[in-house]
Image (cartoon, helix red, strand yellow):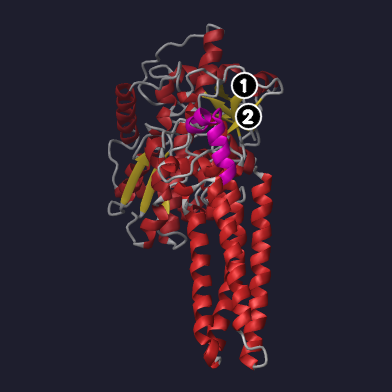
């Protein structure tokens, strides 16, 4: 499912999207059929947070919702479409939101439901899940991007997520099964990413964002007037209470504390903090440092700052959001006769206890993609070498121009095919130099030599150890044999050191290794002359000498082959 999209003709591959994206390998360097480079989107990895849209300086990224299908069906299916309205409509259309909803009634929308009421159900379901022992400490699940991140990128978080559906789905379930509403449902809200949840449950057919409706109204010069009726509205069913605060940071916290004041709740909102903190969650959980509830929202200002609420790249001013939320809270209290306490709250929840089944509002999570293979150290070394990064300093420049935070992260992305070497400034500066290319070839040659040596090292060492052991019984030749074995060990160690020394990279180094192998063979030939063939120990040593000679010859041939290929 593609929610976030890119216009290749507008994209200049500046990598701003890669730098800001919290989802590993969701932004992928691509090329058009005409050969134009741009940064595409891997929908299998994308969590539809929309942050790349905000940070694209070339207006190359955008999202798609269902507003066109919704508008068409609103007129063609009069009376057969019901609207679920997110409480953030008060921020999206301050002072005129009631008039906006009346417009939908006039156009033929059958029923309009307040998702705040669905949020009240979600609060009830979370508290009842805790009291029944279904969950203990958990991460909030009302943010679709956070859920998508766990499903696609960190499967260990799935069991930590609250099992309760989002307020929108809770409202849809209530309307469908309790109120017996058989119409199709459209959700009007601030988040294009909601589409993923709607598709998986098949409960809501249209995801319509405030932004697209604002554009629709502006294009058709449809205007609205302030109703002057406060913050209440005659919804088809009851208007929600404190659930209207879910769209703000700490909104869930305020709801839970109304019913359970002692519960320990921490919150976090905003791309720059949420996902890095989620990556630390399991480590903190192992030390029992986590709160009872961790409330997380992907966008700054929560849903009130969603990508589907802003106009001209800006969300409403914080002062506006604060004023709207303050009035919303006061209005919720007023609709409870001016008193919001445990007894009053229990009245609503006791109604839910009598009329609703907790299991109806609980969900399960499934991993949506396989975890990518983690590259080994040799894998990364090959990538680094191909990018002319031979020293630790080269491999830790971490300039972030490629879009990745570190050179290691870039190497991993290149390994997975989700970034390209050409995006590396260091590589691009050195690609034109013949010397750098030659060094890269030499380094790759050394890697091939090192691999064959390491593969044969255990066998070489085993044979040398046998020679040392058996040499004890050969008195007259013991000194010569032990000295030869010691020399072989030293030479082998020197070969490995030469392969591991990036500062000594040169064609001469390869020649030295080849010469060292020849020295091993000469030592073995001389050793064979001193061995007494007619004793049992002598026979064992002679067999080991032959084996060592065979292994050394194999290594020598490999060195000669790779050296010849890179001349």
| Front-lying residue, 526 or 273 | 526
Which residue: 33% across, 54% down? 291
Q: Position of residue 324 (x, y in %)?
A: 33, 25
For the stretch drawn in magenta, what is the main secondary structure? helix
On residue 8, the disc is 1
| Front-lying residue, 212 or 390 | 390
Q: Position of residue 170 (x, y in %)?
A: 52, 43
| Front-lying residue, 272 or 200 | 272
| 192 with respect to 137 (left or right) | right
Q: Is residue 170 visible?
A: no
Q: Position of residue 218 (x, y in %)?
A: 52, 9
Q: Position of residue 152 (x, y in %)?
A: 56, 46
Which residue: 60% across, 49% down? 445
Q: Is residue 146 magenta?
A: no
| Front-lying residue, 98 or 202 | 202
Asked whether the residues under the numbered discs 1 and 2 touch, taking CB atoms below 8 Å apart as contact, a structural biologist would say yes
Q: Is residue 400 above or below residue 281?
A: above
Instruction: Report the quarter where the N terminus lies.
Output: top right
Looking at the image, is mark 1 or mark 2 nearer the viewer?
A: 2
Mark 2 neighbour class, 10 Å CA radius: few under 14, some 14 to 19, many 20 or more? some
Q: Is residue 522 visible?
A: yes
Which residue: 51% across, 66% down? 491
What element does badge 1 sit on? loop
Instruction: Report the quarter where the C terminus lies.
Output: top right
Of callouts 1 and 2, which one flags the residue occurring earlier in the amino acid sequence?
A: 1
| 327 with respect to 422 (left or right) | left
Which residue: 66% across, 18% down? 75
**Which residues are drawn in magenta?**
425-442
On residue 30, the disc is 2
**Number of callouts:** 2
Mark 1 neighbour class, 10 Å CA radius: few under 14, some 14 to 19, many 20 or more? some
What element does badge 2 sit on? strand
């Amino acid at each position: 499912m593609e929610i976030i999209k890119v216009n290749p003709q507008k994209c200049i591959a500046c990598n701003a999207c890669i730098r800001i994206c919290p989802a590993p390998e969701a932004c992928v360097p691509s090329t058009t059929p005409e050969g134009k480079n741009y940064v595409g989107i891997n929908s299998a990895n994308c969590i539809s947070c929309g942050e790349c849209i905000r940070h694209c300086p070339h207006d190359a990224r955008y999202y798609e919702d269902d507003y066109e299908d919704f508008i068409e069906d609103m007129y063609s299916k009069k009376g057969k479409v019901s609207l679920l309205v997110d409480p953030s409509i008060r921020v999206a259309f301050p002072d005129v939101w009631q008039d906006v909803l009346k417009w939908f009634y006039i156009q033929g929308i059958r029923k309009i439901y307040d998702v705040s009421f669905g949020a009240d159900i979600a609060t009830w379901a979370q508290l009842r899940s805790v009291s029944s022992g279904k969950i203990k400490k958990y991460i909030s699940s009302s943010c679709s991007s956070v859920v998508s991140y766990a499903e696609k990128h960190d499967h260990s978080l799935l069991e930590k997520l609250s099992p309760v559906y989002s307020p929108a789905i809770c409202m849809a379930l209530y309307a469908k099964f309790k109120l017996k509403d058989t119409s199709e449902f459209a959700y009007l809200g601030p988040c294009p990413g909601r589409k993923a949840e709607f598709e998986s449950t098949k409960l809501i057919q249209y995801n319509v964002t405030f932004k697209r409706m604002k554009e629709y109204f502006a294009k058709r010069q449809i205007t609205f007037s302030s109703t002057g009726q406060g913050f209440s509205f005659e919804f088809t069913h009851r208007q929600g209470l404190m659930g209207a605060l879910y769209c703000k940071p700490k909104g869930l916290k305020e709801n839970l504390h109304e019913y359970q004041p002692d519960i320990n709740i921490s919150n976090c909102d905003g791309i720059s903090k949420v996902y890095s903190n989620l990556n630390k969650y399991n480590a903190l959980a192992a030390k029992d440092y986590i709160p009872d509830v961790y409330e997380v929202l992907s966008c700054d200002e929560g849903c009130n700052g969603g990508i589907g609420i802003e106009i001209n790249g800006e969300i409403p001013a914080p002062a506006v959001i604060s004023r709207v939320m303050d009035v919303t809270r006061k209005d919720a209290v007023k609709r409870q006769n001016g008193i919001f306490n445990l007894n009053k709250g229990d009245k609503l929840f006791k109604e839910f206890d009598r009329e609703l089944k907790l299991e109806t509002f609980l969900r399960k999570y499934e991993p949506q993609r396989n975890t990518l293979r983690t590259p080994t150290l040799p894998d990364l070394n090959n990538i680094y070498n191909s990018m002319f990064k031979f020293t630790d300093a080269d491999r830790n420049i971490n300039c972030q121009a490629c879009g990745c935070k570190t050179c290691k992260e870039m190497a991993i992305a290149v390994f997975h095919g989700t970034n390209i070497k050409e995006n590396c400034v260091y590589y691009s500066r050195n690609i034109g130099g013949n010397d750098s290319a030659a060094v890269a070839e030499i380094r790759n040659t050394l890697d091939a030599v090192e691999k064959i040596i390491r593969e044969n090292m255990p066998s070489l060492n085993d044979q040398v150890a046998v020679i040392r052991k058996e040499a004890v019984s050969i008195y007259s030749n013991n000194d010569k044999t032990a000295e030869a074995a010691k020399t072989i060990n030293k030479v082998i160690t020197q070969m490995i050191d030469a392969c591991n020394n990036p500062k000594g990279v040169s064609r001469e180094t390869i020649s030295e290794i080849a010469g060292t192998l020849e020295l091993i063979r000469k030592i073995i030939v001389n050793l064979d002359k001193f061995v007494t063939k007619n004793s049992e120990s002598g026979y064992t040593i002679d067999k080991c000498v032959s084996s060592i000679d065979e292994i050394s010859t194999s290594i020598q041939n490999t060195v000669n082959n790779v050296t010849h290929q890179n001349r």
